[in-house]
Amino acid sequence: MKIDSGSTAWMLASTALVLLMTPGLAFFYGGMTRAKSVLNMMMMSFVSIATVSMIWVVYGYSLAFGKGGGLNKIIGGFGDWGLVGLEKVATAGDGTGIPQLVFVAFQATFAIITVALISGAIADRAKFSAWVLFGVVWVTLVYIPIAHWVWAPGGWLFDLGALDFAGGTVVHVNAGAAALALALVLGKRKSWPKEPMRPHNLPFVLLGTGLLWFGWFGFNAGSALGANQVAAVAFINTLVAAGAASFAWIGVERFRDGSATTLGIASGAVAGLVGITPACGFVTPIGAIGLGLVVGAACAYAVGLKYRLGFDDSLDVVGVHMVGGILGALLIGFLGTAAVNSAGADGLLAGGGLALLGKQAVAVVATLAYSFTVTFVLGKVIDRTMGFRIGEEDEASGIDSAAHAETAYDFGTIHAGVGAFVKALDRRPHATPDTSGSAPTKIEADA
């Protein structure tokens, strides 16, 4: 069919926006870690781009969206291995009019950030080499099958009628379940939770949040696969749900702790973006506000579960992404309406009964169970063979210097600069008598 230039331009832009989210996540996560671990944290995101992009071209796209013959309900086939021949193909018969390779690239960015999201749960203590191997195997054994189940025609959850517009189950529930499994495999950081392990750079966190929020418009509105009315609905829903959730989160903080924090408003915005991801193309803007308020408040409380249950999810991947993704997927069963998108369905509040909610629950449970189980086994195998956790001395001194022979901040230079400034002040001549009658300045008096 003829290429739709407007939709193609929008999808190229959306693909770039979604890719930008992974560096944004690197800043978000990097700012939340301690200073001695920030480079490693950011590297874990960037290396996901390097590895997953190659896997997606070689066999990932083919297995996720290709035809799988008798196994098509579970996994695709190798018919599109290496993307051979796809350079001249428009999306086959789906009416979008975008080149097939644009869709391939768009989906690659989703796989990339899903792997990167998991890293936040094991900050400060994972071997970099083990993380790279884990990412390669995990995207193959976990992400690709679940993407096929939910998004590929013929996948069993797709055929069931479970709805996931932009990745609530495929990306966020999936990454959150995997994060919980890896946190249990690697165990707690030394001195956690007795020692406070606060974010070292909150401006980084806010910068990362801004980049994520900006990129998320491509993530959600781009999932309409064209410049159309559904994309417009997804766009406005992405804006208001994140705003509502960030407001709800700082409201919980103000009620519970007495102060609204920058970390809270950033975390709330991300939680809202997570929650609206599966629903953005299936609910009204008013529904998106309600969803954001519920998800923001719930995730604000959910991040504290790690202290009660005793698992060290370093950067709250479970509390934000798993809980937010679950709620977003299930709330489609209440708030969904076919009036927004004919490809959707009516939820309970639109007169559709409980059928859609049941389908959403099946998708959530299946994703949770499969992702957690396979990730836990994979993590254990890597831990028993090459070791997944760095040594105690390296963890104490800082994983940046141990794993990468670098540090984010050259404190020696900073101290030297301060010393030179003090010495320069000491060499200044004493203040001369002030004949104007005015008092000497503070620096003159000190000199």
Image (tube, rainbow, N blue to C red):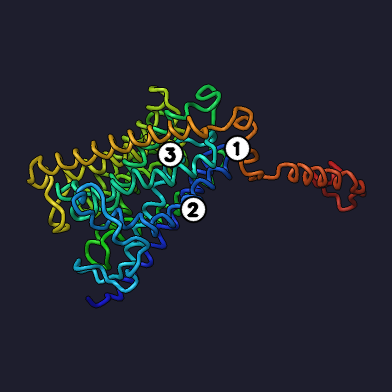
Task: Name the residue nearer the viewer: 7 or 64.
Answer: 64
The residue indicated by pointer 2 is 23
| Label annotation for residue 399 | 1
Mark toward the viewer: 3 or 2: 2
Residue 268, image quadrant: top left
Q: Which mark is residue 346?
A: none
Pointer 3: what residue?
264
Q: Quadrant of the N terminus?
A: bottom left
Q: Say whether residue 439 is left or right of residue 290.
A: right
The span from disc 3 to disc 2 (Cα, nearest Å) is 21 Å
Residue 255, visible in the rendered structure: yes
Indicate which disc, 1 or 2, sits on the residue closer to the N terminus.
Answer: 2
The vertical placement of 416 against 377, above or below, is below
Q: Name the residue: 19% across, 45% down.
A: 332
Q: CA distance from mark 1 to mark 2?
A: 20 Å
> Where 61 sits versus 377, above or below?
below
Which amino acid type is marked by label 3? Gly
